[in-house]
Image: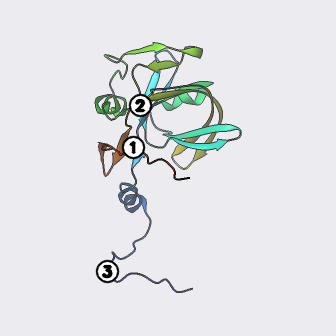
Amino acid sequence: MTLSLDPHSATPVDADADSLRTLLRHQASTVTVVTAPGTPPVGFTATSFTSVSLDPPLVSFCLDLGSSSWPTVAGSRHVAVHLLSHRQQALASRFATSGVDRFAGTRWQPGPQDVPILDDTLAWLLCRVVERVVAGDHAIVLAEPELVRHAGSGSPLLYHRGRYAGLGPTAAPRPARP
């Protein structure tokens, strides 16, 4: 098979870690904070959260095996995934920073199963971990939502091209025509 390329586009390059990282910066991702119970509790910012299945309900996120949060998440039966609002860039940055107490100065409370639940997020899911799959230098964590809570309105925090972004105002949907 012959590969046909647009002569005005960039030349393809080998898919190594650097080129893949550069390419993935073009993908906008929802910003979440995942928390797990422990002494102390752990939490980290993740942009890899996704829905996997509706029947049964399953979601997933990925975590670097070398992260300080991995040992706790590796043994946790439950986690919470918090979808951040576009106003929570500081919270996302705090939970993405290594070597700091991520919960210091953060409003949260112990939730069901003692999982830390962050205050004022756009939404959160309390999930039972059903499987951890090691893939390269990360683990894919599959979890079944048991409880969900979402705000009535709000705009999500996104990550795109190495920085946080939000959505602009959107028009109300038009009514369907009969």
**Gap between marks 3 and 2 measured at Cα:** 42 Å
- Whether residues under marks 3 and 2 lie with C-beta atoms below 8 angstroms apart, the answer is no
Q: Which residue is mark 2?
A: 153
**Gap between marks 1 and 3 measured at Cα:** 38 Å
Q: Amino acid at mark 1?
A: Ala
Q: On residue 172, which mark appears?
A: 1
- Front position among marks 3 and 2: 2
Front one among 46 and 67: 46
Q: Residue furthest front?
A: 178
Tell me where residue 25 sits by quadrant: bottom left
Secondary structure under badge 1? Answer: loop
Q: Residue furthest bottom?
A: 2
- Whether residues under marks 2 and 1 lie with C-beta atoms below 8 angstroms apart, the answer is no
Q: Amino acid at mark 2?
A: Ser
**Left or right: 170, with 4 as reference point:** left
Looking at the image, is mark 3 or mark 2 earlier in the sequence? 3
Using the image, determine if residue 22 lies above or below residue 175.
below
- Percent of width and height locating residue 152: 45, 27
- Front position among marks 1 and 3: 1
Residue shown at 37%/19% (left/top)? 103
Tell me where residue 125 sits by quadrant: top right
Residue shown at 37%/36% (left/top)? 155
Q: Which residue is mark 3?
A: 8
Looking at the image, is mark 2 or mark 1 earlier in the sequence? 2
